[in-house]
């Protein structure tokens, strides 16, 4: 699993880090930086133009998104993991792809799903699958191990799945809501 290009620390803009800490040059307040800016490219999902990193090809809604710049393979994430972890991932992937056009991107430490923006991510572990869905509201459900609020309308719902049965019809509804969030359709409703 060799990365090409530069390596940047991933930074989440939480309520405690304001957008004003970003400088116009793309440099973050504490010396963290995003990749150099390049032309914007059309996303494969047919929505508004997205900025594309010139080194790794990753696409983002804004030019100031820090990321781990490189290319990784999906299989790298499942090497040495229990088969139930891959089965759980495949089931979640089916639910996500049933929602509509989506791009799956293996990254250094996780696998993300994106439409216009990243709306779901998973991190395969040895015997379970950790992940999260980004939603526009807080949902109280025992399957979510943690809910973190980022801003006025972004809630990250963390989960841990030990097998594919975790992803049932009720969870499919949460996935659909997260997909709509990723397409930014929640702004129109």
Image: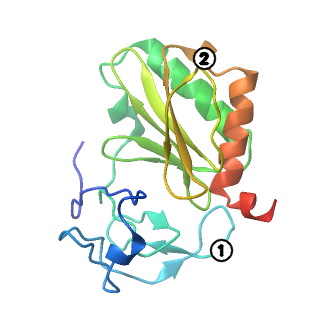
Side (left or right) of 77 relative to 104:
left
Q: Position of residue 21 (x, y in %)?
A: 32, 74
- Residue sitting at 48 percent across and 46 percent down? 112
Residue 159 placed where, x, y %? 50, 27
Tag 1 secondary structure: loop
State the image coordinates of residue 90 (x, y, percent, origin top left). 57, 27
Name the residue rendered at 65%, 39% in the picture: 96
**Residue that mark 1 sits on:** 48
Considering only order in the chain, which callout, 1 or 2, is on the residue closer to the N terminus?
A: 1
Mark 2 closeness class: few <14, some 14–19, many ≥20 residues within 10 Å: some
3 sits left or right of 73 in the view: left
To which quarter of the image does residue 32 belong?
A: bottom left
For label 2, the residue is 166
- Mark 2 or 1: in front is 2
Q: Is residue 24 left or right of residue 100?
A: left
Q: How far from the left and from the top, in percent, is residue 147?
A: 51, 36
Q: How many badges with numbers are in the image?
A: 2
Question: In which quadrant of the rendered image does the C terminus lie?
Answer: bottom right
Q: Nearest the camera: 6 or 158?
A: 158
Q: Quadrant of residue 15?
A: bottom left
Label 2, label 1: how far apart the Cα atoms are? 34 Å
Does residue 185 show up? yes
Is 94 situated above or below 178?
above
């Amino acid at each position: 699993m060799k990365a090409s290009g530069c390596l940047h620390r991933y930074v989440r803009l939480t309520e405690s880090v304001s957008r004003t800490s970003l400088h116009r040059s793309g440099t973050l307040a504490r010396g963290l930086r995003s990749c150099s800016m390049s032309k914007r490219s059309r996303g494969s999902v047919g929505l508004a133009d997205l900025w594309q990193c010139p080194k790794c090809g990753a696409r983002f809604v804004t030019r100031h998104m820090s990321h781990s710049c490189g290319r990784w393979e999906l299989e790298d994430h499942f090497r040495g993991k229990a088969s139930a972890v891959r089965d759980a991932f495949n089931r979640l992937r089916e639910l996500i792809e049933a929602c509509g056009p989506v791009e799956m991107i293996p990254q250094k430490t996780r696998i993300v799903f994106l439409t216009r923006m990243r709306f779901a991510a998973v991190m395969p572990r040895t015997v379970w699958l950790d992940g999260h869905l980004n939603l526009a509201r807080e949902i109280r459900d025992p399957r979510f191990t943690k809910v973190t609020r980022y801003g006025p309308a972004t809630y990250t719902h963390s989960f841990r799945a030990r097998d594919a049965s975790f992803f049932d019809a009720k969870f499919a509804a949460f996935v659909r809501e997260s997909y709509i969030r990723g397409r930014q359709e929640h702004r129109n409703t």
